[in-house]
């Protein structure tokens, strides 16, 4: 692990047990995240994309130990966080935060904005009284909110303003690493660009490192340095954003890129249409998990799981075509 790497993930797995019957016996698993490996460098943004239900959000929450991992290792500043005791993990919480997807349900409607943003500061004993209020006002101003917003409640704000409150809450502890879980998907397109630009400005100002989870590749391209593509719990491709957009290798990545709308009506894109639905993570297909929908499927794909390998410098893919 290089000195420039903040977060390194090795063979991460998160399975949810399926229980049935009177005695709730385990009859199977939901393979939400299955053998994921990647790393994020300090001050950079790693974009994680894929269809709904592919395991992106579960990955983000497992990295922060909000969910208990099934297997694997996650190194944060050269420390395996899965081996830390409760007290050690509590100290580390100030350095790792999350911005949740829904700015409506993730804010407590009974607390004022000042209480919401200052809650973690009080809980960790960082500051109190006048210092607490000044710290909250400072972080709110960085996120585009004003002092008079302190005494207001979440229902008095628009969706974009609520997401700014969520961002302020995540950054109040001055973290090093932030998981942005679909942070703009619930917002209007015009507001999305404001929030994305805010995150980029804050990243530069506060030296933040992001895991940016989204299903929108055009948004991910704008904010990310490197991009990983997930399908049914597995990473199928990983590369620098320009490399991924200019030279996509995996058939699934090509299909996702072909679906991005273009603003120029003269440019006609060749859409790659995928047949069928995404299989159940409780009963994934044998061999390559994408073979049931792949336009380039070979007999080998149905039997053998492709190895996740580096095909060019920094460009990884899991496909029998390479």
Image (spheres, grey):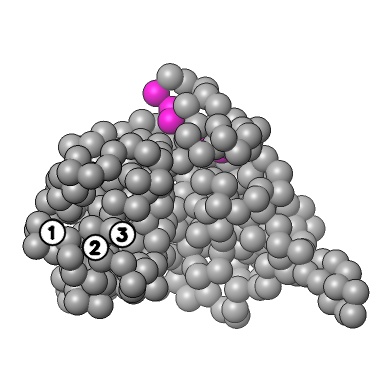
Residue 216: tell me if it is visible: no
Q: Which residue is drawn at 60% across and 38% down?
A: 86
| Quadrant of the drawing holding the C terminus | top right
Q: Mark 3 near mark 2, Cβ–Cβ under 8 Å?
A: yes
First in residue order: circle 1 vs circle 3: 3
Residue occupied by mark 3: 116
The label shown at residue 92 is: none
First in residue order: circle 1 vs circle 2: 2
Residue occupied by mark 2: 113
Q: Which residue is drawn at 37% across and 39% down?
A: 125
Where is residue 229 shown, x and y percent of the image?
Answer: 49, 54
Q: Would you identify the image quadrant in which residue 204 lies?
A: top left
- Residue range corresponding to the magenta coloring: 4-9
Q: Residue at x 26, y 72 (%)?
A: 154
Marks 1/2: CA–CA distance:
10 Å
8 part of magenta stretch: yes
Q: Nearer the viewer, residue 173 or 199?
A: 173
Q: Mark 1 near mark 2, Cβ–Cβ under 8 Å?
A: yes
317 part of magenta stretch: no
Residue neighbourhood size for the residue with mark 1, other residues' Cα within 10 Å, grouped as few (<14), some (14–19), many (≥20) = some
Q: Is mark 2 on a helix, strand or loop?
A: helix
């Amino acid at each position: 692990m290089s000195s420039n790497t903040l977060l390194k993930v090795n063979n991460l797995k998160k399975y949810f047990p399926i229980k049935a019957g009177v005695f709730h016996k385990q009859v199977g698993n939901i393979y939400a995240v299955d053998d994921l490996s990647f790393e994020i460098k300090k001050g950079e943004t790693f974009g994680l994309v894929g269809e709904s239900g592919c395991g992106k959000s579960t990955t983000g929450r497992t990295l922060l130990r909000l969910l208990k991992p099934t297997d694997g290792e996650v190194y944060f500043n050269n420390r395996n966080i899965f081996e830390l005791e409760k007290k050690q993990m509590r100290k580390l919480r100030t350095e790792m935060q999350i911005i949740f997807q829904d700015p409506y349900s993730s804010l407590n409607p009974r607390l004022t904005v000042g209480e919401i943003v200052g809650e973690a500061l009080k809980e960790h004993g960082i500051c109190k009284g006048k210092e607490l209020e000044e710290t909250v006002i400072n972080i709110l101003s960085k996120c585009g909110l004003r002092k008079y917003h302190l005494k207001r409640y979440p229902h008095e704000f628009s969706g974009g303003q609520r997401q700014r409150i969520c961002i302020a809450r995540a950054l109040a502890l001055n973290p090093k690493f932030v998981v942005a879980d679909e942070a703009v998907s619930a917002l209007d397109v015009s507001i999305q660009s404001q929030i994305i630009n805010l995150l980029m400005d804050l990243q530069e100002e506060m030296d933040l490192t992001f895991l940016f989870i989204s299903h929108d590749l055009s948004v991910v391209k704008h904010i990310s340095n490197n991009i990983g593509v997930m399908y049914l719990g597995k990473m199928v491709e990983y590369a620098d954003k320009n490399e991924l957009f200019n030279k996509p290798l995996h058939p699934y990545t090509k299909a996702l890129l072909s679906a991005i709308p273009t603003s120029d009506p003269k440019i006609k894109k060749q859409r790659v249409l995928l047949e069928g639905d995404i299989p159940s993570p409780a009963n994934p297909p044998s061999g390559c998990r994408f073979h049931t929908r792949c336009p380039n499927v070979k007999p080998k794909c149905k039997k053998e799981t492709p190895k996740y390998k580096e095909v060019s410098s920094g460009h990884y893919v899991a496909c029998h075509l390479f």
